[in-house]
Amino acid sequence: ACFCLPPLFGVGSALVAATAGALCARRLARDQALRLALVLVALGVTLGLGLERVTPALVAASRESDLIAAWRIDRGEALPGDLASVERASARDPGDLLLRFALATDWKRRGDLAQVLEVLGDPSTSPEPALRSASFNLRGIARLAEGNLSEAIPAFERARAADETAPVMFNLSQAYGRAL
């Protein structure tokens, strides 16, 4: 635990290992204490560097359940606790468009279109074209449901520009049809 916690809090792992070695070595002979301190320093440096490389994998693994919950919400098959899980994850990372999209989808199903637009924010910040397209499409759906064609059509056009898919094209045709 001592070797894992210090890199997370910015304390050098070598310093902790040396301190632990010094405390352990008080009762040993000088040559044994020196070897123990060197081994602990090497172990601390190795674990510190290794933790930096393992951290992204640990973060991704902890995010997996939130992504599965977001997927179930998007599919309309949410389990109890999925919405709360996605809300907590979105609060931790408000810039994650995927989580915001899942929350906006849930608000759309509830019929609160103003909340859909508020939760989505600005989809143009996403580097992923498919997610950006889906978010603009959802924005257009909310505007179309409000009867606001002047904002729905540009949203669908931006969705088509990001990633031209059948649902986007269908919604765009519906908006243009209503505009006639």
Image (cartoon, rainbow, N blue to C red):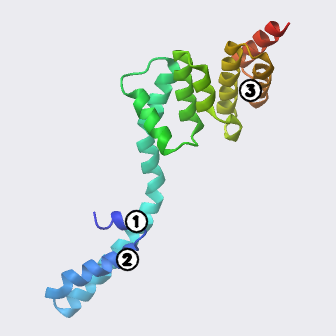
174 on left or right of 37: right
Which residue is nearer to you in this view: 37 or 153? Answer: 153
Question: Would you call the spot at circle 2 few (<14 residues within 10 Å), some (14-19), or many (20 or more)?
Answer: many
Badge 3 local density, few (<14 within 10 Å), some, or many (20+)?
many
Q: Name the residue at the bottom extreme.
A: 30
Q: Point out the residue furthest to the right here.
A: 180
Pick the front one: 174 or 36: 174
> Along the polypeptide, which appears first: circle 2 or circle 3?
2
Q: Secondary structure at mark 1?
A: helix
Quarter of the image with the N terminus in it: bottom left
The numbered mark, 1 or 3, whose residue comes first in the sequence reads 1
Decide: is 73 above or below 28. above
Residue 136 image label = none
| Distance CA(mark 1)–CA(mark 3) | 42 Å
Residue 2, picture quadrant: bottom left
Q: CA distance from mark 1 to mark 2?
A: 14 Å
Mark 1 vs mark 2, foreground winner is 1
- On screen, residue 161 above or below 167: below
> Can residue 36 be seen at all in this image of the molecule?
no
Vertical order, 29 against 47 (above or below): below
Q: Position of residue 31 (x, y in %)?
A: 22, 91
Answer yes or no: is residue 31 visible. yes
- In front: label 2 or label 3: 3
Q: Amino acid at mark 3?
A: Ala
Expressed as whole percent of the image width and height from the top left, the position of residue 132 reads 68, 32
* Residue pointed to by mark 1: 9
Of residue 47 and residue 136, the one placed in the foreground of this image is 136
Residue at (73% x, 28% y) in the render: 163
- Residue 159's mark? 3
Q: Quick check: 55 left or right of 15? A: right
Please give the residue where the numbered disc 2 appears in the rendered image: 14
